[in-house]
Image (tube, rainbow, N blue to C red):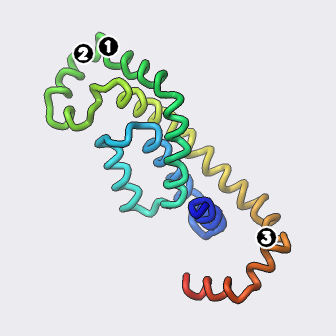
């Protein structure tokens, strides 16, 4: 519930739609792929180091993890197909024989298939998320602000104190 409140706050904030959409996209990649993998460590570093909205990232991870659970057989089949391509035997062997190749775990069918799926979906998720965020801000946000309960909450002393502490 707290994450949903943070998401609504982020959607209503001055944060760039790109920051929010990048949080969703990186959350999708993080959620679709196995948790303990080198590329997820890199994604976590990117999200924390750059100005990517953490609330949208934290909301997207469990949503796409659930989706990844159901899609994992298909993603494992894709990974197996990629690993058994005759044209890729030499590059896969070379990668497997390096320290990076061992750490990346790309020799696991699910890791490779889920990362390939996530990377193919990433540009579409990024653009679609940005469009949805802009549409929410233009059409839905103003309607929500008109509700009496929202106006009552925003007029309360507690809300003013919260705004003062928040900065």
User: Quick check: 63 above or below 12?
Assistant: above
For label 3, count other residues whose C-alpha is less than 10 Å away and answer few (under 14), some (14-19) or many (20+). Answer: few
For label 1, count other residues whose C-alpha is less than 10 Å away and answer few (under 14), some (14-19) or many (20+). Answer: few
Image location (x, y in percent) of residue 147: 84, 70
Q: Residue at x 35, y 45 (%)?
A: 40
- The residue under label 3 is 145
For label 2, count other residues whose C-alpha is less than 10 Å away and answer few (under 14), some (14-19) or many (20+). Answer: few
**Observer-nearest of 163 and 12:** 163
Image location (x, y in percent) of residue 5: 62, 64
Q: Which numbered tag is attached to residue 28?
A: none
> What is the C-alpha distance between the residues marked 3 and 1?
55 Å
> What is the C-alpha distance between the residues marked 3 and 2?
58 Å
- Report whether 95 appears left or right of 113: left
- Report whether 67 appears left or right of 97: right
Q: Earlier in the sequence, mark 3 or mark 1?
A: 1
Where the N terminus falls, by quadrant?
Answer: bottom right
- The residue under label 1 is 84
Q: Earlier in the sequence, mark 1 or mark 2?
A: 1
């Amino acid at each position: 519930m707290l994450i949903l409140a943070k998401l609504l706050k982020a959607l209503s904030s001055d944060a760039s739609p790109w920051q929010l959409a990048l949080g969703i996209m990186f959350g999708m990649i993080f959620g679709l792929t196995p948790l303990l993998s080198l590329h997820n460590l890199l994604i976590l570093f990117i999200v924390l180091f750059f100005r990517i909205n953490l609330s949208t990232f934290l909301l997207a991870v469990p949503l796409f993890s659930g989706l990844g659970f159901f899609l994992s057989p298909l993603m494992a089949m894709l990974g197996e197909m990629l690993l058994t391509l005759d044209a890729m035997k030499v590059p896969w062997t070379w990668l497997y024989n390096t320290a990076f190749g061992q750490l990346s775990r790309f020799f696991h069918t699910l890791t490779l298939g889920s990362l390939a799926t996530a990377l193919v979906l990433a540009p579409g998720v990024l653009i679609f998320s940005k469009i949805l965020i802009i549409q929410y801000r233009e059409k839905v946000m103003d309607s929500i602000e008109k509700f009496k309960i929202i106006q009552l909450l925003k007029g309360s002393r507690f809300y003013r104190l919260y705004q003062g502490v928040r900065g």
